Amino acid sequence: MYFSFETIQTFVVGFIIIYAILWIKKPRLSKNEPPMVPYKIPIIGQVITIAGNEASYEIFNASDSFDLNEAIKDVLPMRHVLPTINGFGDVQHMAKMIREEITGKLSLYTGRIQEQLLIAINKEIGDCSIGEEISKHEDVINSFANVSKEFSKFLVIPPFLSFIHPKIHQQVVTLPIRLGWNPIRKHINTLKKYLKPVLEKRLIDKEILGDKYKPPLDVIEYYLNEPEYGTTVTVITDDYLNYTCEVLIHLIFISIHSTTRHISSALHDLAGRPELWDDLYEEQVKIDKECNGMLTIVHIDRMVKLDSFMRESLRTFGEVAGLMHRCIEDSYTFKNNTTIPKDRIAYIYFDDSHYNEVYGPEPRSFLPYYGLNNKKPATKINKNYLVFGAGKHACPGRFFVINEIKILMHKLILNYHIKTESGKLDEKKFAGPFVLPLNTGICLLKFTDDNLSIGNGITSNPTLSKFYVKIDKKQGIQNM
């Protein structure tokens, strides 16, 4: 396609004129707004507000004034990708489902979590063969593993047009979807292929068995009955399949993305701090002997040192700011009399919450037993620990996530000595305020001595096999 010089010139002039008009008409900060950062080089973009420690907690608790999902719409077009549930769907309904069906039945899921994690460990790290039950649906596992990566494609285009209006950026980002390109659709179709016969069999079993029907313990059974809406599915239609699969894709995205990032970070935190190894290893061996290799919720609760380590790994994860919220009222006035207008995006300033004087004179140092010494488990939220949010919209799945990570860490610590390739803690890198996945390897040195002793005569330097597994952003644990 050829553009003449006059056409290009007209386009450039028109752009400059539009920009100048919008700049002149752009509303200035009111006297009660937070001060603007004194940029030396003018930045083209929208004004955002960074909320410190006290203000962050206000945002989480002012659910009628701030909305997380409304802010995410600017950068991630979920309602176009998952149209049946309108993006994030009924958030309150989903949160209720997670509290009742997952967190409320956590002890019932523990055995299944162990089984699936061991399968994944053997597949990605160990040398055992894969069971028929997992290889039969490998494409489903691949969909679970790759959904987050597919969503990241929508974040490739930065919101550089938001200085005009956020909706212009939304139109640009969603244009490929409106023209028929949706990388998530192939994963939805994969789930539909396997889910339809499962659901149809359940409907037949319910009709035949009546009161003797024993509902399986899973999310799809919950949605099959839809208790929130007082309805029961009687026919598996294509519309219902789309709805259920989009709900599952949403759950996969919000859970696997964050869980794998924090598992990877925790492994790097342990691998780069050899001084913590003996303590954590001793605790895991002791618990393994108590449970005879089969963990229960009681045994997981006894992993107090590992839990404290996980809390610190989450606190020092490194993201400077995140969990953006949109002001949905005409304006909002904080307790310090600072006011922000409607539609303003406010970021939670994690640095101010996670690295303040509460954590002592060196708050940026890694304090592995802070949680244990101060009776603050990894799931406990307060204004100085906002990894899972706060208020009534705090992450309802955090109990499941922490338990899952602890089980995985427990199994890995029992079977492998975990070290970094460099022998020291690897430096984190950033893209703006966000932490990038570490691209350095982790060595998992497999134990070969079956008679390691704990307690009197603890073995701090066990015999190791001569191979290691490198885990990086392209393969292994980070892609589970």
Image: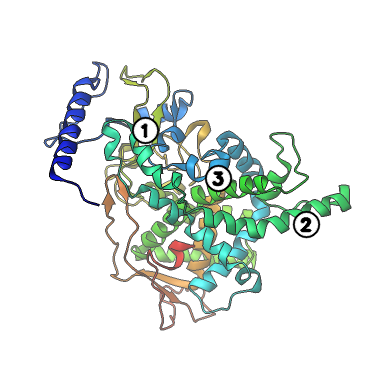
In this view of the protein, which residue sits in the foreground, 340 or 278?
A: 340
Judge the density around disc 1: few (<14), some (14-19), many (≥20) Cα neighbours within 10 Å: few
* Residue under pointer 2: 201
* Sequence order check, earlier mark of 1 and 3: 1
* Residue under pointer 1: 167
| Tag 2: amino acid | Lys
Judge the density around disc 2: few (<14), some (14-19), many (≥20) Cα neighbours within 10 Å: few
On screen, residue 292 versus residue 321, left or right, reads right
- The colour mode here is rainbow
* Residue under pointer 3: 397
CB contact under 8 Å: marks 2 and 1: no
- Residue 336 drawn at (x, y percent): 32, 19
Identify which residue is drawn at 41% across, 40% down.
385
In this view of the protein, which residue sits in the foreground, 81 or 299?
A: 81
Q: Is residue 458 visible?
A: no
- Residue 283 drawn at (x, y percent): 51, 62
Q: CA distance from mark 1 to mark 3?
A: 31 Å
